[in-house]
Image: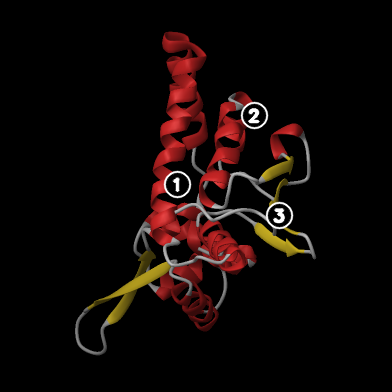
Amino acid sequence: MDTAFVDNPTRKKILLALKMHGSMSVEDLSGEVNITPMGVRQHLLILERNGAVEYSTKKHGVGRPGFLYKLTETADNLFPKSYQRLALEILTDVENREGKEGIAQVFRRRRERIASETKRLLSGKTELPDRLRAFADLQQKDGFLVEVEESDKDFRLKQFNCTIAKVSLRFREACRQDLQLMRDIIGEDVVREQCLSDGDQCCEYVIPKTGGRLPE
């Protein structure tokens, strides 16, 4: 989900109100966020178009039915989670019991699973530029901020955020397997020149144009 639409402070208040109170009418939201019902409807329309809210009808006596608005399941991703803390706790337990090899196995299996699914989604993308940009689109959908640059001799894929940043800082095996993931999908000649976990501005992968066949 593209979250640019929640940069507006009023829409943030509406989302928070729905998160805390569940289904609410326009009138209820108007009182909660202190703007007119017409203003609430305009914000709700934007939130609905972006898949963050949905509505149902509710009859209340004679006349036109009212509408109750609530968050969609997708909107739940807009709120902070403690998943990375939980992941760190689980991985620490694995390390204490099975050592570094146990950790390596966890991230290796994760990489193999992601690589298999990604290759399926990219099937038919047999040219490097097409596959690389399709891969970047998939990463965008998974929450990465990605940019692809092209020069005469290579492509550069830059990830400006890490969806498991805290995990990667603690367990560098995650970074090693992410590099191998790129090689599994794009080619063995991929090189990572920068890494967020090293304090760099981004994870930057260099893909030469003169590489061999793409992985199948």
Coordinates of residue 124 in the picture (x, y in percent): 43, 67
Residue occupying image coordinates x 34% and y 63%: 23
Residue occupying image coordinates x 61% and y 27%: 172
Identified by mark 1, the residue type is Ala
| Image disc number at residue 20 | none
Residue occupying image coordinates x 45% and y 61%: 122
Residue occupying image coordinates x 66% and y 48%: 161
Q: Nearer the viewer, mark 3 or mark 2?
A: 3
Structural crowding at the residue carrying mark 1, measured as other residues with C-alpha within 10 Å and reported as few (<14), some (14–19) or many (≥20): some
SS under mark 2: helix
Considering depth in this image, is 178 or 129 the residue closer to the camera?
129
Report which residue position mark 1 lands on.
115
Considering depth in this image, is 203 or 41 the residue closer to the camera?
203
Q: Quadrant of residue 123?
A: bottom left
Report which residue position mark 2 lands on.
169
Coordinates of residue 3 in the picture (x, y in percent): 57, 63
Against 90, residue 43 (above or below) is below
SS under mark 3: strand
Against 12, residue 108 (above or below) is above
Coordinates of residue 120 in the picture (x, y in percent): 38, 57
Identified by mark 2, the residue type is Leu
Q: Nearer the viewer, mark 3 or mark 1?
A: 3
Give the residue at the far bottom of this rendering.
63
Against 69, residue 185 (above or below) is above
